[in-house]
Amino acid sequence: MARLRSDFWVAAHLRRCGVEGIEAVLRRRGAAEAGAIYVTVDHLDGLVDLYGPAPQSELTGDETDRLFAPLLSGAAPPDIEVRMVRELRYDPDLWWISIDDRLGRSALTLVRAEPR
């Protein structure tokens, strides 16, 4: 099954967050067709979670939506910034969505409950 372009997926996700009352903004625009998508969720208490594309080993091929895996959980904002700078050096075409939500909601489909 063909995967939805990154720009369409991000636009739809931002709209979905808005409908669900989750404050989300696009922090970095990536490659329209296939840029990797990363999402940070700031709990507004000094802790931030980072989600990134699910590893290929977690995909079955039957997915109808993009799947995400937790990369960092309950991290300090500077740690998230360092990680994202490293990700940007590796993949300058990535997208970055930033969410502020006290409940930690992201509206993402996750493959794993715990970060590695």
Image (cartoon, rainbow, N blue to C red):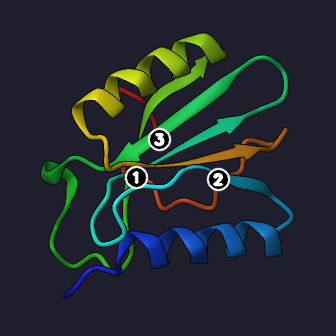
Which residue lies at the image location 26% right of the left edge and 40% below the top edge? 91
Would you call the spot at circle 1 few (<14 residues within 10 Å), some (14-19), or many (20 or more)?
Answer: many
Instruction: Tell me the quarter of the image containing the N terminus.
Output: bottom left
Q: Which residue is mark 2?
A: 106
CB-based contact (under 8 Å), mark 2 and mark 3:
yes
Instruction: Tell me the quarter of the image containing the C terminus.
Output: top left
Would you call the spot at circle 2 few (<14 residues within 10 Å), some (14-19), or many (20 or more)?
Answer: many
CB-based contact (under 8 Å), mark 1 and mark 3:
yes
Residue 89 is at least partly visible in this image: yes
Q: Amino acid at mark 2?
A: Ser
Residue found at the far bottom of this picture: 1
Q: Is 45 on the left-hand or right-hand side of 53?
A: right
Q: CA distance from mark 1 to mark 3?
A: 6 Å
| Marks 2 and 1, the one that precedes in the sequence | 1
Above or below, 23 against 10 in this view is above
Q: CA distance from mark 2 to mark 1?
A: 11 Å
What element does badge 3 sit on?
A: strand
Q: Which residue is mark 1?
A: 68
The tag on residue 88 is none
Q: CA distance from mark 2 to mark 3?
A: 9 Å
Would you call the spot at circle 3 few (<14 residues within 10 Å), some (14-19), or many (20 or more)?
Answer: many
Closer to the camera, 39 or 60?
39
| Marks 1 and 3, the one that precedes in the sequence | 3
Q: Which residue is mark 3?
A: 51
